[in-house]
Image (spheres, rainbow, N blue to C red):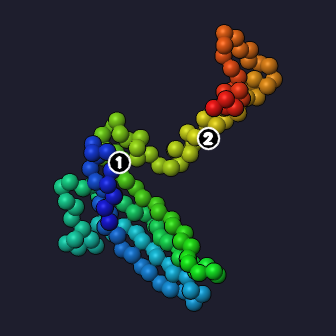
Amino acid sequence: MQVYAPTTLAPTRDFWTLRYTTSLENGRHVVCERSLLGSGGGSNAATAAQFVRGEMLPSGYLIRPCDGGGSVIHIVDHLNFKPWSAPEVIGPLYESSKVVAQKMAIAALRYIRQLAQESSGEVVYGLGRQPAILRTLSQ
């Protein structure tokens, strides 16, 4: 599997994985996948010069049928893109979703704190500045 970088400044990631698939009695299908590492890689384990070997930690899919037809697919991907191999300026593009979620939560908490301060009268606005709630409603 190859994953292309969102910018040309970072090389493409290459994953060499072992995949196991099984069907369960209830019609569900399970696909488990993990990177092959070390000497067990064989001759195909070599990475081309233009790629960086990424690591797929335990990952997989659960495919379950729906009553009305079709299927629902649950995907769990746990990838290590090895961001330290990318130039420092684009490292943030490879940050984990945990870091992105933390940044979004902090921004939301700051906004809520600002709303609370405005509603309690702690912050006084002048010179044409609007409280956060009015800015939100006017957008």
Question: In x, y percent, where is residue 15?
Answer: 32, 63
Q: Is residue 7 left or right of residue 130?
A: left
Residue 66 sits in quarter: bottom right
Question: In x, y percent, where is residue 136?
Answer: 67, 31
Up the image or down, 131 lies above or below 70; here it is above
The mark closer to the camera, 2 or 1, is 1
Up the image or down, 41 lies above or below 28; here it is above
- Classify the position of the N terminus by image quarter: bottom left
Question: In x, y percent, where is residue 48?
Answer: 19, 59
Q: Which residue is mark 2?
A: 105
Up the image or down, 23 lies above or below 138; here it is below
Front-most of residues 30 and 73: 73
Dot 2 falls on a residue whose secondary structure is helix
Point out the tag, 2 or 1, that comes first from the N-terminus: 1
Residue 6: assigned label: 1
Residue located at (56% from left, 86% from top): 27
Near mark 2 (Cα within 10 A), the count class, few <14, some 14-19 or many ≥20, is few
Up the image or down, 135 lies above or below 99; here it is above
